[in-house]
Amino acid sequence: MSILYSNAVISVRSSRLLSTDQMRRMIAAATLIESTKVLFECGYDENLLTYQPENTNAIIEKEYTRTIGEFTELCLNPNLLQLVLCRFDYHNAILAYNARITDNTPSTTAFYPFGSIEINTVTKSIQSKNYDDFTRHMKEALEILDNLSPTPLDVEVELVRAMYFDMFRHLEKINNRYITNYFRSEIDIQNMRTLIKIGKNTLQSFNKLIIGGGHLDESHFNAIISKDYHDIKSSLVQYDEVINAIIKSTEEKNPTIFENVANRFLIAQAKQNSEDSFSLNMLFSWLIEKLEELRIVKVILMGKKIGKSKEDLRNQLEGVL
């Protein structure tokens, strides 16, 4: 398989991504079943036509599995593949570690079955504190946490920091500045997410939680913490909309506003140079857009399943629609 063939397939897949209009139609649909029919138009499983509400999770999981399966088949660069899969490993490790320290077992559907490490291996290894099957960075992060009395936020930050160490090891081998730029932007977004989570009462602890490697350094975040956001916007033009979302999320105590705007910003970063048929950028951009589509589909379907109003769903997806 050549990269030209791979990108030709991805070009077709990209043309069937869920549009903003189709998202609105899903929300406006009178019933959950009518909402899923829009997905059938976009190439989702034909069995959606016989959809039952209790199968909502199964539909989403099946499309996740198909998406990662297609990416695995079409990705000709083993380092890009490992870079993508390691995110799922770390997601599962965070769930498993937090389950251990809180005695709160997550739903099996919360784990992603797509990583390079089996879910059972992740959960059993973390439960027994035997980390030999993990990467050096993951192992070191878990050992650091074992020597603390960590909160779930500590667990997230420490393991996400280790994840980016592993990712940048692969990025060096991929040697694609557009994909590297995407992950540097993603680190900035993760740091902003942490800033929102810790709140204004504990800002003095933020510097300890900053993950390095992004476009923004500690001085930028210190400016955000110590000054009015508007004072630093001129030096952070590309993050203008995201910073506005931080302000609005904080004022309205609604973190989904930030998440929606941040994800849209990251998609724009992923799409840079995505039309180059001789690079990995088209495949990577499609994957990022598809995973965001699945996040939105999950919000809509799960919302409809539990009886959320159309207005509530529109508010939850503010910044997307």
Image: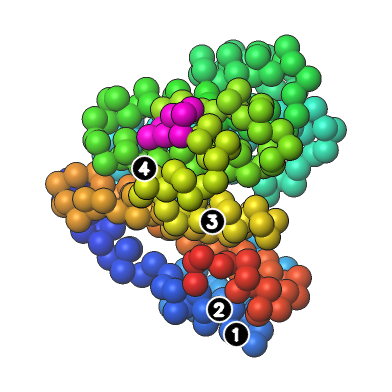
Q: Earlier in the sequence, mark 3 or mark 1?
A: 1
Residue in the picture at 70% in, 23% down:
126
Residue at 71% over, 78% down: 309
Q: How many labels does the image show?
A: 4
Residue, disc 4: 235
Q: Whole-Å distance between the Cαs marked 3 and 1?
A: 28 Å
Magenta part of the chain: 214-220
Q: Which residue is drawn at 26% across and 47% down?
A: 281
Can residue 301 be seen by looking at this rendering? no
Measure the alpha-carbon separation of dots 3 and 2: 25 Å
Q: Would you name the residue on which mark 1 appears?
A: 29
The residue singled out by tag 3 in the image is: 245
300 relative to 5, above or below: below
Residue drawn at x 72%, y 68% as measured from the top left = 54
SS state under label 2: helix
> What amino acid is found at the position of numbered circle 1 in the picture?
Ala
Identify the mark nearer the N-term, 4 or 2: 2
Residue 179 vertical placement versus 141 (above, below): below
Residue 82 image offset from top left, x and y in percent: 40, 32
Mark 4 / mark 1, whichever is N-terminal: 1
